[in-house]
């Protein structure tokens, strides 16, 4: 069990520290971007601002997630962290699209840019982004919500390197096109990063089957157990990000019906030991009373 599970509030303190650092950095970059005329600095500032907003959302979600289950939320509140991760990735996608548009417009008419200011603030941003990536990286095993934050911060650190390179090229060669070009690279990286991660979050919210579990192998395993004739109405899903669950109907042979509790226990043991499924709702029915024409998956 991770250290984070023993001391959840320690992770909160790290997130709060990262929020403060990103707030100060964002204000400095916005001011520097306006004074120097650099779109790259504005782009990095927007990226950092999205990180700060994401951290606030993640912090609130972490605290809500600790609430125990109640009559209104019988499964508890842990899935709020998955919702927060979706909000964070969506914000990244919107920012990436905005930066791509602005960078494309500036390619047509590159403005004068103060390279020295870009370098100074780029180096400062790199230091802050690296520290916040380390802070959130140390607790990223906390789930999709915190992992989204870590990826935000890691992408910030990488884009800060690009900002510094941009400033150096402007100072040395007066290459004005580098500012919008680097901005487009940052936008592309943000969009690629978001697209590769958001699918897993959506899968959890859509109650998709756990991607690491071969559902056909699980059902074949159950069918192969003594006393089991068939299986239908199977629902595989994730209770939380890494907690697989199965809800299904199991048809038991009529002559094995007196042993239904033994069969159920045997199924649970196989599910847990072979597939890591520790939450299973099993509805047993005798062969003589099984649902006719029932679908294997879902409720059809």
Image (cartoon, rainbow, N blue to C red):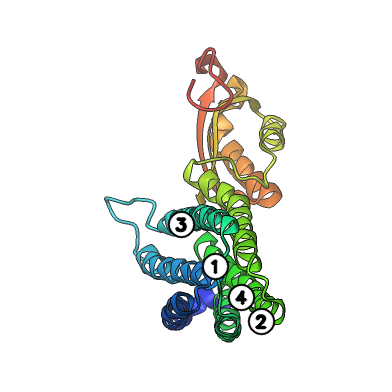
Locate residue 183, reporting x and y percent. 59, 63
Quadrant of the image occupied by residue 67: bottom left
Instruction: Tell which tag, 2 or 4, sits nearer the viewer.
Output: 2
Locate residue 58, reporting x and y percent. 43, 66
Q: Nearer the viewer, residue 67 or 86?
A: 86
Residue bearing the label numbered 3? 91
Q: Tell me the SS state at disc 3.
A: helix
159 up-or-down from 206: above or below: below
**On-image quarter of the N terminus:** bottom right
Q: Tell me the SS state at disc 2.
A: helix
Q: Nearer the viewer, residue 172 or 217?
A: 172
Quadrant of the image occupied by residue 208: top right
Left or right of 173? Residue 121 is left
How far apart are labels 3 and 2 at the CA level?
Answer: 33 Å
Which sits earlier in the primary sequence, circle 3 or circle 2? 3
Residue bearing the label numbered 4? 160
Q: Nearer the viewer, residue 33 or 108?
A: 108
Which sits earlier in the primary sequence, circle 4 or circle 1? 1
Tag count: 4
Q: Tell me the SS state at disc 4.
A: helix
Residue bearing the label numbered 2? 171
Q: Is there CB contact under 8 Å for labels 3 and 2?
A: no
Which sits earlier in the primary sequence, circle 4 or circle 3? 3
- Where residue 111 is drawn, which disc sits there? 1
Which sits earlier in the primary sequence, circle 1 or circle 2? 1
How far apart are labels 4 and 1 at the CA level?
Answer: 20 Å
Q: Give me the residue at 49% from left, 70% from top.
A: 42
Locate residue 212, reporting x and y percent. 68, 47
Point out the residue furthest to the top here.
292
Locate residue 231, reporting x and y percent. 60, 26
- Where residue 296 is drawn, which disc sits there? none
How far apart are labels 1 and 2 at the CA level?
Answer: 14 Å
């Amino acid at each position: 069990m991770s250290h984070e599970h023993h001391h959840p509030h320690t992770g909160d303190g790290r997130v709060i520290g990262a929020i403060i650092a990103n707030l100060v950095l964002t204000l400095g970059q916005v001011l520097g971007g306006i004074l120097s005329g650099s779109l790259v600095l504005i782009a990095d500032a927007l990226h950092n601002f999205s990180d700060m907003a994401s951290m606030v959302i993640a912090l609130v979600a972490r605290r809500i997630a600790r609430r125990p289950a109640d009559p209104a939320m019988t499964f508890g509140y842990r899935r709020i962290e998955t919702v927060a991760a979706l909000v964070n990735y969506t914000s990244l996608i919107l920012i990436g699209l905005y930066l791509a548009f602005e960078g494309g417009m500036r390619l047509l008419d590159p403005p004068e840019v103060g390279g020295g200011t870009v370098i100074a603030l780029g180096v400062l941003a790199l230091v802050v982004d690296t520290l916040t990536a380390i802070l959130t990286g140390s607790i990223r095993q906390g789930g999709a919500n915190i992992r989204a934050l870590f990826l935000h911060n890691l992408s910030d650190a990488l884009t800060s390197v690009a900002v510094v390179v941009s400033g150096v090229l402007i100072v040395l060669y007066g290459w004005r096109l580098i500012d919008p070009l680097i901005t487009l690279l940052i936008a592309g990286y943000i969009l690629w990063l978001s697209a590769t991660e958001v699918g897993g979050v959506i899968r959890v919210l859509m109650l998709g089957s756990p991607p690491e579990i071969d559902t056909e192998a699980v059902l074949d395993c159950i069918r192969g157990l003594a006393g089991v004739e068939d299986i239908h109405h199977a629902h595989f899903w994730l209770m939380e990000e890494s907690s697989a669950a199965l809800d299904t109907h199991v048809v038991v042979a009529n002559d094995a019906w007196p042993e239904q509790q033994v069969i159920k226990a045997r199924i649970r043991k196989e599910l847990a030991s072979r597939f890591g499924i520790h939450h299973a709702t099993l509805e047993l029915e005798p062969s003589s009373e099984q649902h006719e024409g029932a679908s294997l998956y879902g409720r059809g």
